[in-house]
Amino acid sequence: MSNKNKTSKRGSDPHAVREATQYETPLPSRELVLQVLSDQGVPLSNEQIYSLLDIDDTERDNFNKRLNAMEREGQIMRNRKGALCLAEKIHLIAGTVQGHPDGFGFLVPDDKTKHPEDLFLGPREMAQVMHGDRAMARMAGLDRKGRPEGKIVEVLERSTKTLVGRIVRGTGVTIVAAEDKRINQDILIPYHLDMGAKPGQVVMVELTEQPSSHAHPMGKVVQILGNYADSGMEIEIALRKHKLPHEFSPAALNQAERIPKLVQATDYKERKDLRELPLITIDGETARDFDDAVFAEPINKDKPNLGWRLVVAIADVSFYVKPDDALDKEAFERGNSVYFPRRVIPMLPEALSNGLCSLNPDVERLCMICDMQIDTNGIVQKYQFYPSVMRSKARMTYTKVADMLQNPNGDNAKEYSHIMPHVQNLYSLFKLMLNQREKRGAIEFESTETMMVFDDNGKIERIVPTGRNDAHKLIEECMLAANVCAADFLHKNEHAALYRIHEGPTPEKLEALRTFMAEVGFGVTGGDKPHAKDYGKLMNLIKQRPDAQLLQTVLLRSMQQAVYSPDNVGHFGLAYEAYAHFTSPIRRYPDLLIHRAIKAVLKNEKYKAQDWNALGVHCSMTERRADDATRDVTNWLKCYYMQDKIGEVYEGTVAGVTNFGLFVALDGVYVEGLVHVTELGNDYFNYDKARHEMLGERTGARYRLGDRLTVKVARVDLETSKIDFTLVTGTGKTSNQNLGDDTGHGKSSNKPLSINKDKAAADFKMMSTRALEKAKKDRSGAKKASKTPTRTGVKPSSKPSSKPASKSRNTKNKGKR
């Protein structure tokens, strides 16, 4: 290190102290790297940068990670020769390509502060890239809709090496149509490289040639997964489409296998023994991985005004999964467990997730304890964290606990009489905490979650709603309390952490919300930065209205998405100043990081992750990836369920309004589909995004969120997971009617299903027109052609927004927010 201190550039790093505080092996700061590149004035190779900054061999891996992160974030970029230069020195924009099923796309800039708008990429530009590629583009003016348009200058990084798709037999060549419809190019496979796959089969393809402006991508089949309609194929496709890790590495499996199947007595060292405490788990009927157990008792039975003791025990995964070991690397890549209907992709091997780490009844388990004292107002006054050994006294379900609370003399109460007093204690404490939640102003949205019921052949028999009872809410409040304590503990001890943050509405969304609410006679208080209490007041005002579901949906859509970040900005929806995820380390990587940080503080140490910002971005991404994959599977299953219901008529509620039509949620079926704008009548419809409505220019017919409609199932497309409806009755309110008089009250799923019209045929420059037409006919079958409206239409036309369907019931949703 002495040599490095003498190096003028590295020794003059203005942020050296910060780096030494945050990292065990401090590196040159990002600012210094940018300064060196600026001073040199020319692109530099990695070796040149190593030399200028005295990066030795032991530091190169970590330093390369820093350079890669800077490149991802648009601070630096590589030229054609791989040398690094300042992105701002070149009048080009680096970003990630986002494809669209209709053939166009967008370049999402890496640096949104400098380039806030995405660049539109027309089909000609998209021909040379695929969804997810990183590219460099230049501004090329505005397109006909006034959007900034880009021209691809260079492809920086190819994201697609393999893909999942379906075989289409062409003339002289095999075609694979990608399952990810954001990839528009079909892949050409020479016959001798298609493994004999038959049309309609799902295959994995390895790309041998990437697309270019003059040629389509080429590839070879490396695996035949099976027929498209095979049971479970929808999950196999989703896993590969979203690049979800689903096979554990041999190293991770070997490590899990070497861990003893039972907790060892030697593991009790420096742990508080809570094996006699009547801790219990409360989960869904089908759950197999039990992260948490709970116990509550009065602090003093003779003095009830002293409040309650709440003990939340969480599986001590961090004892078995150490930083950078094989299990840790696997857990990091996965980020979280993924819960599909009928199948779970765990974050950890089952030997841990369902075995040694799961708080199963009547066996010793290692855990981390959050031991709280809560006053009679439901406010946590004191808390402490410590490692422990426990022994769960019962594996309870939400259904059983809810029944015990409602029927204290019933069969379940009698069967579990040994824990009945403890369940009642938990319930008494829960009511105090719930009251405090309401005073705090936390937002509570009512939603309808669903569950798919399958027969023995894996076919959906029906889709049923699943309500939340008091047992669900009880556990949720216990988990929220422990999560808040974890965030507070790390914040007060000034230890870096990943917080679960949820920012308030953006100015644009807030303005749109106020515009809509004004139409129905309500205002949104709180000025430019409303508090959750302002939303809560509005919820209380509207909850008795017949259109309460509509108004709640608009409120929900005005909010931002919760993410993970080391920068604590609080949690808007829950009305917490600091919040973190601590309670589910078996199935969420951020929780595992929080455990490690808490343990480090307890030992007067620091847990130094390489880059907390990068961890937050990664964990947020894996969460969205899992949501997208489960949504794909749910949408496909719902389409499969509806394919024999074409021609049937249903009542429904408008659950979403877009510039291309209305999404309608069917009553009692919990499925959504699209009434295309061309089905709304002989008129020209204006789309008003702020008011969530379509308004006919000539007739004044108005369709908006919450309207009741009668529709007929017209088309179900399994290939694209789309459902189309035609309008039977429900011609829309006329424009002079008062919006506040609308009584739309149908229940809708959480989010509408994304539906688009048939994809336009790709321009195959390497195939004859006759071969292309034959391939397309084989692929589309008897698909109904898209309608071309004459007088019917919509304006203004803009990029369709993709909206997902409501998810199946997730039994592991504690502390999701």
Image: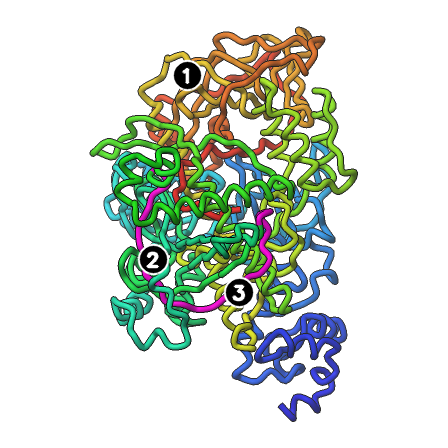
Which residue reaches farthest right?
A: 527
CA distance for labels 3 and 2:
21 Å
Task: Specify the segment rendered in magenta.
Answer: 376-399
Which one is earlier in the sequence, the residue at label 3 or at label 1? Answer: 3
Which residue appears at 30% of the width and 56% of the height?
360
Residue at 53% across / 84% down in the picture? Answer: 57
Seen in the image, is 610 located left or right of residue 785? Answer: right
Answer whether labels 3 and 1 touch (C-beta < 8 Å): no
| Residue 598 coordinates in the image, percent (x, y) | 52, 68
| First along the sequence among labels 3 and 2 | 2
Crowd tier of the residue under label 2, counting other residues whose Cα lies within 10 Å: few below 14, some 14–19, many 20 or above: many
In which image quadrant can residue 174 be found? top left
Q: Is residue 330 left or right of residue 132?
A: left
Amino acid type indicated by mark 1: Ala
Q: Which residue occupies the extreme front position in the image?
A: 302
- Placement of 233 over or under 569, stated as above or below: above
- Residue 795 forms part of the magenta stretch: no
Q: Nearer the viewer, residue 269 or 534?
A: 269
Q: Which residue is mark 3?
A: 384
Front of the two marks 3 and 2: 3
